[in-house]
Image (spheres, rainbow, N blue to C red):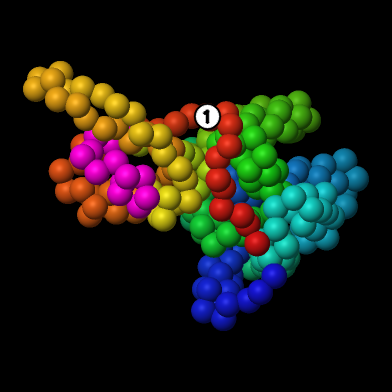
């Protein structure tokens, strides 16, 4: 594990910004609406509310949240990456601290607006972390682990787990806030999927007269191989080479740009790939 002052300095700034955004969002929208944002954060708020409602005890956010994150943190250190997990621990601790010290501020009391914008802002904060190779903790660790281990986009799976958590909240405290929380979580998940594309994949079909050069540039830009297929044009009935490859979504634009620089006349078809089986290079997380 090594440190790059420029890159790690940028990561520290991004983590700090994400922690502030998430803490303000929870104190401004989530608590105002009585919502449960899902994951360990939602579980922490559920435990706090349970303690206040049934035992008259106010539990501080920070120690409860850190305790619940111990298992996800272990998964991070064991299976994902040490530097990644260290920055994630910083995010978890800083967010928890800020939630306890930043005063609550009510922007609106419209529960639907709170659900939508609370989810959007939460998704932005989580995406800032993920794009900096860190996470907000909790189920984000599990989502990334599943994405790396199974090669699938796991955010909707985590959404399913969160809905199960909300079912418990609905049974105990009433269904209205639980149902609005589903809107909040859905908005957050969609923002994350839009802004963070590392574990999403794109399939490339490239019709070219320079198949070897195109295959080489794909490998140079993404470390992914390619398959060269022989085809025939339906109009002129001339032989054509088709280069087939699958790359990460966040690499696809760079790869396509590089392909067009090698062969300006190449015909490139790009489309989303839901799932692949077999060897697929995934950039390791430090």
Residue at 87% across, 41% down: 54
Which residues lie in the magenta part? 205-217
Q: Residues within 10 Å of mark 1 (few under 14, many from 20)?
A: few
- Residue identifier under label 1: 275
Please identify the quadrant where the C terminus is shown.
Answer: bottom right
Residue at 49% across, 40% down: 200
Whether residue 23 is visible to the viewer of this picture, yes or no, is no
Residue at 40% across, 34% down: 227
Residue 123 percent location from the top left of the image: 52, 49
> Is residue 212 one of those drawn in magenta?
yes
Looking at this view, name the residue that lies furthest to the bottom: 5
- Is 230 left or right of 40, judged from the image as shown? left
> Is residue 42 one of those drawn in magenta?
no
- Is 176 left or right of 113, judged from the image as shown? right
Out of 53 and 148, give the one closest to the viewer: 148
Whether residue 54 is visible to the viewer of this picture, yes or no, is yes
- Is 276 left or right of 212, judged from the image as shown? right
Residue 103, quarter of the rendered image: bottom right
């Amino acid at each position: 594990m090594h440190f790059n002052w420029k890159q790690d300095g940028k990561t520290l700034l991004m983590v700090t910004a994400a922690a502030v955004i998430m803490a303000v969002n929870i104190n401004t929208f989530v608590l105002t609406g009585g919502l449960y944002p899902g994951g360990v954060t939602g579980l922490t708020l559920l435990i706090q509310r349970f303690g206040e409602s049934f035992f008259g005890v106010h539990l501080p956010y920070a120690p409860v949240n850190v305790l619940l994150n111990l298992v996800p943190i272990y998964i991070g250190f064991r299976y994902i990456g040490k530097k990644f997990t260290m920055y994630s621990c910083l995010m978890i601790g800083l967010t928890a601290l800020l939630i306890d010290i930043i005063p609550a501020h009510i922007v609106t009391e419209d529960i639907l607006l709170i659900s939508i914008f609370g989810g959007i802002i939460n998704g932005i904060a989580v995406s800032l972390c993920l794009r900096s190779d860190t996470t907000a903790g909790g189920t984000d660790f599990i989502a990334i682990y599943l994405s790396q281990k199974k090669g699938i986009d796991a955010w909707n799976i985590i959404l399913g787990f969160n809905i199960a958590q909300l079912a418990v909240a609905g049974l105990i405290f009433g269904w209205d806030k639980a149902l609005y929380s589903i809107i909040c979580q859905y908005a957050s998940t969609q923002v994350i999927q839009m802004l963070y594309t590392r574990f999403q994949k794109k399939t490339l079909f490239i019709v070219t007269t320079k198949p070897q050069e195109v295959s080489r540039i794909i490998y140079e830009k993404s470390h992914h191989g390619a398959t060269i297929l022989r085809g025939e044009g339906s109009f002129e009935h001339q032989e054509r080479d088709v280069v087939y490859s699958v790359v990460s979504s966040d690499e696809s634009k760079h790869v396509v740009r590089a392909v067009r620089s090698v062969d300006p006349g190449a015909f490139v078809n790009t489309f989303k790939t839901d799932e692949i089986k077999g060897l697929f290079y995934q950039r390791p997380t430090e």
